[in-house]
Image (spheres, helix red, strand yellow):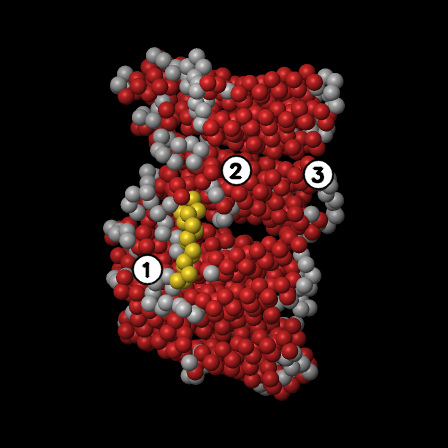
Amino acid sequence: MKALLILFVTAIVVLFAGLSAKRQTLVLLALGGVLIALGATVSDLLVGDTTGWNEMYATMFRFDNYALAFGAVILLTTALLFGLSGWGFRHLSDTLGDNYGLILFSICGAFCMFSFTNMIMLFLGIEILSIPLYVLAGSRRDNLASNEAALKYFLMGSFATGILLFGITLVYGSCGTFDLQGIASAVQSGRATGNMFSIGILLIVAGLSFKVSAVPFHFWAPDVYSGSPNMITAFMATVVKTAGFAAFYRLFSTAFVDSGEVWNVAIAAIAALTMTLANTTALFQKDFKRMMAYSSISHAGYLLLAILVAGQTGAASAILLYTLAYSIATVCAFAVYMTVAEQNADGNFSAFNGLSKKEPLLAAVMAISVLSLAGIPPTVGFFGKYFLFTAAFEAYPWLIVLAVINSAISIYYYFKVIIAMYFTSDENAYTVSVPVAFRWVMLVGILLIGLLTVSPDTILGLIP
Amino acid sequence: MSLYLILIPFVSSLILLLARPAASRSIALVASLANLAITLFAFSGFNGDGSFNHEFSVPWVSSAGIHFRLGLDGISLLMVLLSNLLAPLIILSSGGEKYHPDARYFGLLLMMLGALNGVFMALDGLLFYVFYELALIPIYFICAIWGGDNRIRVTLKFFIYTFAGSLFMLVALIYMYLQTPGTHSFLWEDLLSVQLSNGAAWWVALAFFLAFAVKMPIFPFHTWQPDTYTTAPTGGTMLLAGIMLKMGTYGVIRWMIPLAPEALHDLSPIFISLAVFGIVYASIIAIKQTDLKRLIAYSSIAHVGLIAAGIFAWNKVGVQGSLLQMLNHGINVVGLFYVVEVLERRLGTRSLSEMGGIGKSAPNFAVLFMIIMLGAVAVPLTNGFPGEFLLLNGVWNYNPWLGALAGLTIIFGAVYMLRAYGLVMFGETNDSTANFEDINMREWVVLGAVALMVLVFGFFPQWILNITDGSVNRILGAVQF
C-alpha cells in the first residue's frame, strides 16, 4: 500500500512539476519516487508485514507477499526504464511531465492488479493500467505509426475490457459475489455451476488473454509494439505483461482453482497456439521491434503454462522469476536497440551490424540479454523456463515437449541479432553514441542477471 | 580441488574477454597449464575404487533440489585429463598469422575449457545440463567469428541442432527429477535410484539418446558435423572433435545408461546398429573425400561410432575400450587437425589433389604425420590399437556379426588414411609443394607432443586402463540390463 500511495503522490507531483521544471528535475523526481516506492516494497517483503499498511482495504486489496513481490519486480523494471528515459524521452519537451505522470498512474493500476481480492478491483486495475497506455502509445504525435498504434490499442483494448466485464458479471450472477474467496467457496459448495458460470470464466479468460497478448487475441500486439515509441514498447513488453500475468494467476489460483474442468482445455489450447504461432511468425520478421513483439507473445505462451497449474506450490514463484528475468533482459535489449536505432531508424536487424566492433560492451549486454530471452543456460532466463516447465510437467508433459521445441525454434530469430552484431560488418559506418545513463542501467541489468543466475533462490523464496 | 579446474578457466576467460590484454595467448597457456598441473596432482592419493574424490557440493537452488556438486571418479578423471591435456596443445596451435592472436578467441577457448571440465565433473543432473549447454556458446562464437566460408549458416545449424537435441535431455531430466521421492533432487545417486516403468524408461532413454546422438554424432544425426568441422577454425575443430564430442559419449556412460537401464535391454540393439552403420557409412564417404579436413571429420564419425557401439555393448571390455579410445581419439584427432592446419597455412588449400611430394622437403613433418596417422589407423604399438581392439572385442562379445561389421573400421581407416598420407607426402611435387618449409619450433612442440603420446599410450595403455578400472567395475555392477 505504501508503494501505491508513494507512486500516486509522485505522479501528481511530476504532472504538475512538468509545467515548469527542467527535464533533469523531472527525471530525478520520477526516478526518486519509484526508488522510494521500491525501497518501501522491498522492506515490507523482507519484514513480512501483512498487517498495518498492508491489510485488506474494504475487502478490495490485500498486499500479501505475492503482491509485494510482483510490485517489486515492476518497480525495479520501471526504475531501469526511468534511468533510460533521460535520453529515451529526448524528443518530448512540454509533455515530459505528462508522460511520467501517465506511466506512474499506469503502475498504480498494475498494483491494483496484483493485490485485488475483489473482481471489481481487477477490472479497475486493468483499466487504470491500460488507459494511460493508450495515450502513451500515441505520444509521438507526428508519427503515423504511433497514432495507428494508439487507436488500435484503444479500440481493441476497450473491446476486450468489455468482454472481461461481461465475464465478470456472469460470474457474479452465478456466485452472488465479486469477492475471490466468496467465489471459491461458492464453487466448492456447488452453487456456482452451469453454463452461465462456465461462459463467464471463458469470457474472463478471453479478456485477460487479450491483455497479455495470447493467441488468438494477440493481433493488436505486433502493430502496437512496433508503432509505439521505443520506451513505451519496452514498458508494455515488460510491466504490462508482468502485471497481466500476476493478475491472471491471482484470479485463477484463488477463485477458479477448483473449476479446472471449465478452463483447463481452453488455456492449454491457448498456450499451445501462442507458443507455436508466435515463435514461427517471429522467424520471418525483419524488423527488430516486431520480432520482439512476437517473442513477447511467445513468452506469454510459456507463462500460460504456469496458469494451467494455478494453485500448485512453486507456480507463482516460477512466474515471478520468469517475469523478472524476462523484464530485465527486455529492458537491456531495448536499451541497446535505442542506441543503434538513433541513426538507423528503419528498425531492421541491420541496425545492429558491426556493433561488436563499435561498442563491444553494448554488444555483450545485448548478447547476454538475447541468450537469457532464448533460455540458454546458465542465464537466469534458462532458470525461469526451467521452473515453469517443472511446475507444469507432471500435469501436461506434452505441452512441455511443445514448449521445449518452441524454445529451440526461438534461438533462430534471437540469434539474428547476435549474427548482425558479431559477424556482419556495417557498410554504412553508422556511429553509436551511448549516454552515460544507459551504461549504468545496462550495468545494473547485467549484474542482476548474474546475481539471479547464481542464486535464483532469493526470488523463489519470496512467495511462500 | 575440482572447483579450481572450473574457476581458473572461467576467471581467466573473463579477464581475457573484458580486459583484452596483449599477451592473451600466454595468459591462456598459463591458465591451461595450471589446470593440467592440478589434474595431474589429483592423481596422487586418488581412490580408484569408483567412489568420488575431491567432491565439492554446495546447494545452488535449495528449494528446487539443485546442487552445485562436482566430483571425480576414474571415468571423470580420465575425461578431465583429456580436456586439460589437450587444452595447452590447442592454445599453442592457435594464433599466429591467421587469427592475429585475439584475446577474445583465447577467452572463449578458456570458457569452453571451464564448461567442459564442468560437464565431466558434474554430479547433479541440472548442473550437468547447464554446463552441457554452456559449452555451446563459446564454440559457436569461435566458429562463427574465425571460421571459413559459409560459417554463419553452418554454425547456426550446428547450434540449433545440438540445442534442440539437448532440450529433450532436459525434459527427460525433469521427468526423472519429479520421480525422485520427497522433495525432489537432481543428485546423481538420487536419480540413479529411481525405478522407471518400461514405457517411461523408453522415453527417457530415447530423449537422452537424441541429445547424445546429435553430439557424438551418430547416424542419422550427423549431418551437421562435416560442415561444422570443415568451416570451423583449427582450434575450434580441435575443441569440437577432441573434447566436445566426448561429452556425448561420457553422457551415455554417466547419465543415460545408469538412469534408464530398464529400456536399454530393448533399445541398445538399435543404438549399436546405428553406431555400427555409421562406422561403415562414414568410412566409405571418407574414402571419397578430397578435402583433408572433411576426410578427418568423417573419420571422426567412424571412430566415435565404434566408441558408442562399445559403450552400448555394456560389457567390461567394451566400456574400458571406449574410455581408452576417447582419450586416444582425442589426442590423435588434435594431431591430425593440426597437420591440416600446417598444410593449409603453407599451401592455402586443403585439397588432396593439390598436394604431393611434401615428404621430400619436409622430412620431420612427414615422420610426425606418419606416427599420428598410424595412431589413427590403430596400428599395434600406437595408441589407437588397444582401444580399437578392446572395443571390437566388446562389440564382438555382444554380437559377432556387429563385431565383424565394426571391424571394417580398421580396414577402411587404413584405406582413407594411407590414401591421404600418400597423396600428401609421396608422389610428384608441384609448384606449391616444391618448397614446402619444414615445421618450425611451435609446430614441432605440438606435433611432437601428440606423436609422443601416440607412442607412449600405445606402449603402455594399461596406465590409462588402471585409472578407470575401479569406476567401470562399479558402474557395471550397479547398472545391469
Q: On residue A326, which mark appears?
A: 2
Q: Work out whether mark 2 precedes mark 3 in sequence or the reverse, and give the earlier one.
A: 2
For residue B109, what is the image quadrant?
A: bottom right
Element type where label 1 sits in the image = helix
Closer to the eye: label 1 or 3: 3
Q: Which residue is mark 1?
A: B257
Q: Locate residue A150, reporting x and y percent.
A: 61, 23
Asked if residue A370 is positioned above or below residue A80 in the image, the reply reads below
For residue B432, what is the image quadrant?
A: bottom right
Q: Is residue A220 left or right of residue B45?
A: right
**Label 3: few (<14), some or many (≥20) within 10 Å?**
few
For the residues labelled 1 and 3, the Cα–Cα distance comes to 54 Å
Q: Residue at x 68, y 68 (%)?
A: B97
Please state which amino acid type lies under the numbered disc 3: Val
Q: Which residue is mark 3?
A: A436
Q: Are marks 1 and 2 on the same chain?
A: no
Q: Is residue A270 visible?
A: no
Element type where label 3 sits in the image = helix
